């Protein structure tokens, strides 16, 4: 009976890990690593959180019934297609001999991105309030995920519509990559504005929504979505180009039409505007975060 231990039990084999996302790294484990490893782990955690929020947003916004996720691309296509089709069927020609159907498609589709990001910004935190019980989820994660979803939908819708236009009219984009850069500039600029809008919801998101919605409609003639800078005399061009979104739409139109007509824009001005509005948005959101009620 010597050495008998009644409470001892044989070691159990370790259960295999079930398939799924990798376990989240704890802050204590991060402190034991080097700075580069900590940055990589934090970046991986951020990407995992944003990816999960993005999938949740797709489910809650579009669901799985009927067309489901396809509405993500069909919605901007219907709106842009109807506006472009009306101008095409009206029969009026455009200066420079450019195709009106393509002109209004590359104008309204990116404007849909502008309108969508700003209109949904005020209610973004309230729509995802339960997620903030998780320590890893921040306000910024939710805003980034929603804006990335809108950007992906618009890029896909633009690609499909321009492909259809090219197949029917033989008018193909001159530089699709450069056009996509212009769309991403709009998304980045609107992301900064959305941060400011979310920060303003500290004074009530319903009041902010009432202001933002008419603002996006009033901005239609000012964004540059349906005008080209070269249409105007040089004195007016300098005033019009003070608006950074005009530069972004000029980049998009150059990607579609190339050197057929002149385009006026400054990439450095666009980058500076995007950086400025995002810095202001980050500061505003940080200052207002403790006052936001969910």
Image (tube, rainbow, N blue to C red):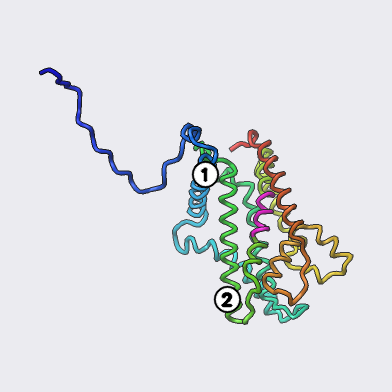
> Between residues 156 and 101, which one lies in front from this camera angle?
156
Camera-nearest residue between 30 and 92: 30
Total marks in image? 2
- For residue 164, which numbered disc appears in the image? 2
The quarter in which the C terminus is drawn is: top right
Q: Which residue is mark 1?
A: 40
Q: In this picture, which residue range is highlighted in magenta? A: 184-192
Check residue 24 for magenta coloring: no
Sequence-wise first label, 1 or 2: 1
Judging depth in this view, the residue of 77 and 150 nearest the camera is: 150
Question: Which residue is pictured at 76% across the width and 68% down the height?
Answer: 227
Q: Say few, some or many: other residues with alpha carbon within 10 Å of mark 1 (under 14 / 14 to 19 / 20 or more).
A: few
Is 190 covered by the magenta stretch?
yes
Q: In the rendered image of this protein, does residue 154 appear above or below residue 212?
A: below
Residue 74 sits in which quadrant?
A: bottom right
Please name whichever residue, 196 or 235, is drawn nearer the observer in this view of the structure. 235
Secondary structure, mark 1, is helix
Q: Quadrant of residue 186?
A: bottom right
Say which residue appears at 58% left-offset and 54% top-offset: 148
Give the CA distance from mark 1 to mark 2: 41 Å
- Give the farthest residue toward the right: 235
Residue in the image at 64% along x and 79% along y? 171
Q: Quadrant of residue 113?
A: bottom right
- Residue 49 lies, in percent from the top left, at 50, 45
Residue 166 disc label: none
């Amino acid at each position: 009976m010597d050495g008998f231990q009644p409470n001892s039990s044989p070691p159990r084999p370790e259960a295999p890990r079930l398939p799924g996302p990798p376990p989240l790294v704890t802050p204590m484990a991060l402190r034991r690593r080097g700075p580069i490893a900590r940055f990589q782990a934090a970046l991986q955690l951020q990407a995992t959180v944003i990816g999960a929020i993005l999938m949740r947003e797709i489910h809650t916004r579009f669901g799985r019934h009927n067309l489901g996720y396809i509405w993500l691309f069909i919605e901007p296509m219907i709106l842009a297609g109807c506006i472009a089709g009306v101008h095409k069927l009206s029969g009026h020609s455009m200066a420079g001999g450019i195709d009106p159907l393509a002109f209004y498609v590359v104008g309204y589709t990116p404007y849909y991105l502008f309108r969508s990001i700003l209109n949904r910004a005020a209610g973004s935190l309230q729509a995802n309030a339960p997620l903030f019980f998780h320590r890893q989820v921040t306000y910024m994660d939710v805003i980034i995920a929603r804006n990335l979803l809108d950007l992906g939908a618009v890029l896909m819708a633009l690609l499909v519509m321009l492909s259809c236009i090219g197949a029917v009219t033989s008018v193909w984009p001159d530089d699709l990559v450069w056009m996509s850069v212009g769309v991403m500039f709009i998304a980045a600029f609107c992301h900064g504005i959305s941060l400011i809008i979310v920060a303003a919801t500290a004074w009530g998101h319903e009041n902010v929504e009432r202001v933002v919605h008419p603002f996006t409609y009033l901005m239609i003639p000012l964004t540059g979505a349906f005008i080209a800078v070269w249409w105007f005399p040089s004195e007016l061009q300098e005033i019009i180009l003070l608006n950074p979104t005009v530069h972004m739409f000029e980049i998009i139109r150059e990607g579609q039409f190339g050197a057929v007509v002149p385009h006026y824009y400054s990439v450095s001005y666009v980058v500076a505007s995007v950086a400025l509005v995002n810095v202001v948005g980050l500061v505003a959101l940080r200052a207002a975060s403790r006052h936001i009620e969910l």
